[in-house]
Amino acid sequence: MTQWMKRGKEVLLDPSLNRSTGFTSSQKEALGIVGLVPDATETLDLQLRRVLEQLAHKATDLDRYIYLVNLLDHNETLFFKTVMSDPARFLPIVYDPTIGEACLKFGHIYRQPRGLYLSIERKGKVREVLGNWPEKDVRVICVTDGGRILGLGDLGANGMGIPIGKLQLYTAAAGVSPRGLLPMYLDAGTNNEALLADPLYLGLRRKRPPTEELYAFVDEFVEAVQEVFPGCCIHFEDWTGVDAVHLLARYRDKVCCYNDDVQGTAGITLAGMVNACRAKGTKLVDESFLFLGAGSAGIGLADLLCSALTEEGLSLEAARARVHMFDVVGLLESTRTDLVDFQKPYAHPHAPMARNDFAKAVADLRPTTIIGVSTTGGAFDRSVVEAMCAVNDRPVIMALSNPTEKAECTAAQAYAWSKGKALYAAGVQFEPVTYEGRTFLPGQANNFYIFPAVGMAIVATKARRVTDAMFIRAAKAVAAQVTDAQLGQGLLYPLQADILETEIVTAAKVAEMVFDDGLAGVNRPNDIEGFIRAQVYVPEYS
């Protein structure tokens, strides 16, 4: 059924068509909705004023999240008008950090379905389930199995809040039209006993299957997407670490896909490192890195950093030698026998060190940068920060775990313990910090600077594949948009208030690479940035 065939109540129930009080008198008559909405005709700006007034009466950000998701379910245009009117205010509500609480309570705050739920019990009928989605020109699917949601672990069906939120950011942050975006949850069960015992849990009440069974299910899903939604890019999100790495390797050279936890996290961290080097007057090849966390995010980040270092002239072996990693056991070193395949390139000869030896490792290994992807709040304690200051004039401290309580250290701690010397970024946004009369602007190393821009480039160019080089290009494009003045205040990333412009410019740089590498499914335009801008979604009643 096309939008032109809908009349009466059907129009008001379709969030992509509904304007509520925004219909003109002639539209009401033509659509058969006279009397079904108030007789007033309001502008979008006036409707936004009412939304902001109603939001002001909400007590918590979770209440605001629930309100905004309900708005999205009824009036898509007004929702995006709201979020895009003040991204610095609303992105933390519709996504991180509020999304963490929303996922923990997903089954309890659930109002109505959004996206597609695909159960492993439908194995053998995946094509039919995909065919039930009403929009046939799907350009991006963001899909999770809920195995590792943020730093919260296995949330099963509660993790559906993540792909819903991620795709909202495609539109709000990079202007990708919401029409071709599909959030999905692949339900293979959960090992979270509390959820299995929760009567309001919305997923399958069974434990997760063996890896071979899960991958066979994902294989069928990926193959079905190629048939039902040809040209669609699959964005894998918040899978368990081993699955995230192995599934990306399984499909990346066969279909258009990427994993945001692996590549997006790496891209935004690389952007921060580029600007940390600007601030210090060094080069990326001068840096050495010590990670706390060696899962999919950490390994993906290390791999992309090493790719960037090879672009700067190092051999891959020399690049990897600059990266050391800790996991829950301790230092990855060559005598350990418990490492998985993708961790082994970073297991260098060294005496064993336990997890609680991280400060000692800083003193021994003398990294210029420490990167936290551990989901362990407070892991970068005073001893760690002071150890970094003992071996660096300008230590780089990136506490990337989220939500807020999972951050390895706060901005205030990093600046105070380093006596204002640290170059700091976190995975969540912290308020400006004043230390000894100087105000620092801590940056947020949030993937939303990267993946929506890459997504816009993929959608606009109809890219056939997604490469690591695209994320390196995106990282450098984001970094270049931080001014010297902002850098002087410690800011490693552009202001969130400017995120749409930042991502349009970034998307154009990535699209240029897609064309250069012969991966585009459309002809190369003369003006690539103009080509991108012409496709940017604008929340208005046409």
Image (spheres, helix red, strand yellow):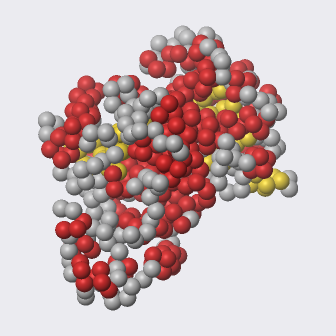
Q: Is residue 170 visible?
A: yes
> Residue 537's x, y, as percent?
44, 58
Residue 130 in the image: above or below residue 336: below
> Residue 18's x, y, as percent?
32, 72
Residue 9, picture quadrant:
bottom left
Q: Nearer the viewer, residue 86 or 480?
A: 480
Q: Is residue 324 visible?
A: no
Q: Give the residue furthest to the right.
A: 437
Q: Nearer the viewer, residue 270 or 185?
A: 270
Residue 257, picture quadrant:
top left
Q: Left of 409 or right of it: where is 32?
A: left
> Residue 336's x, y, as percent?
51, 13
Q: Left of 499 or right of it: where is 187?
A: left
Q: How many marks?
A: 0
Q: Nearer the viewer, residue 226 or 51?
A: 226
State which quarter of the image contains the N terminus: bottom left
Q: Left of 408 or right of it: where is 110?
A: left
> Residue 14's x, y, as percent?
27, 67
Q: Nearer the viewer, residue 376 or 464?
A: 464
Q: Residue at x 59, y 38 (%)?
A: 475
Q: Residue at x 81, y 45 (%)?
A: 420
Residue 42, picture quadrant:
bottom left
